[in-house]
Amino acid sequence: MLIIAWSDTGAMLDLRLLAALDAVARTGTFGAAAAELGYTQSTLSQQVAALERRVGGAVFDRPGGARRPRITPLGRLVLAQARTLLEADSAARDAIDRFHAGAGRVDVGTFQTVTNVLLPILLDRLRVEHPDADVRLFEDETEEPPLELLDLAFLDVPGPGDADHLEVFRDEHVLVAPRGSFPPGPVALAELAGRAMVALPPICDQAVVEAALARATVAPDIVFRTVDNQGITSMVRAGLGSAVMPVLSVWGQRHDEALSFHRLEPAVPDRVVRVVSRGTLSPLASRLRELSVDAGQQLVRDLAADGPVS
């Protein structure tokens, strides 16, 4: 990296000349400085001479013979500024190297299901590869998260048309009911007509559910809406009504003896969870995006191994 500074005379200075000044001042001789920087002594002398021309005066007194060069008052002034620039350059190089190696910060938009079931798998994998990664999560239960403020966002809607979309996983919609409300096995959508139901707000994936019910001319009696998945299962457990939910959003309640889970016939379209981004990604964000697909596949395998919905 080449950081450019300006001297009081308006002459342009570059880091090679400033590094030569610093090396001679630290090592005490032109020969030792040249060896440290990988130059010949002649090349190093030429760089110091070029620096002196640009700052308008000698930066070293050269007594000759065996005596060491002595830094001049002008040299000390330039050296103080040079070391500030050299330190800044070193820090910039280090930050850029860490960026390309996958370090740094990544801002991720999420929602309940992703937070609860996908991110634990995903972040475990990311930490193995990048233990110092700075991951910031922002949970947003809206259809249009602020992508301009995020590196990545997980959505259960397609997202903006100018964004890049990658499918992470999909899960089926199931009926969650108070145990005993329906016989074991699949439940016909028509059975939900007029029944009391609890639901999420009618946006995102819930809008897909309600559109599928409308196409089947099924009009349930929605008695309560909440953004909280656990709130939905709590109200189902309390007997307030049933719910149509993506299976992974309620799978943590699958062993609850007060609940039963049923497939629907005809099926409501699967919920599709995507990771969405816009523009060029950092290496860290790009790797997180790749790992999200692997984590999603593991999630689906774990779900299949856990036994079918009735």
Image (cartoon, rainbow, N blue to C red):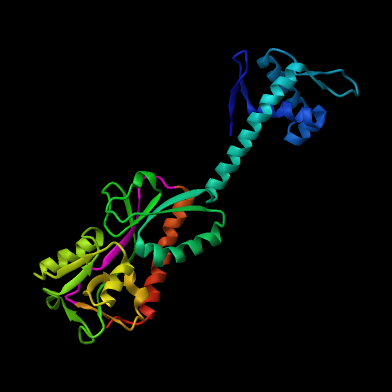
Drawn side of residue 121 relative to residue 146, left or right: right
| Residue at image point 11% right, 66% down | 214
The stretch of residues the image draws in magenta is 265-281
- Any magenta on residue 274? yes
Answer with the quarter of the image where residue 40 lies: top right
| Residue at image point 61% right, 34% down | 89
**Residue 260 in picture, x, y percent from top left:** 27, 81
In this view, the residue in front, 235 or 116, is: 235
Q: Residue furthest right?
A: 66
**Residue 41 in picture, x, y percent from top left:** 78, 28
Drawn side of residue 97 relative to residue 120, left or right: right
Answer with the quarter of the image where residue 139 lies: bottom left
**Residue 6 in picture, x, y percent from top left:** 60, 20
| Residue at image point 13% right, 78% down | 191
**Residue 63 in picture, x, y percent from top left:** 87, 17
- Any magenta on residue 123? no
Q: How many marks?
A: 0
* Residue 1 appears anywhere in the view: yes
Vertical position of residue 114 compared to residue 1: above or below: below
Quadrant housing the N terminus: top right
Drawn side of residue 13 relative to residue 64, left or right: left
Quadrant housing the C terminus: bottom left
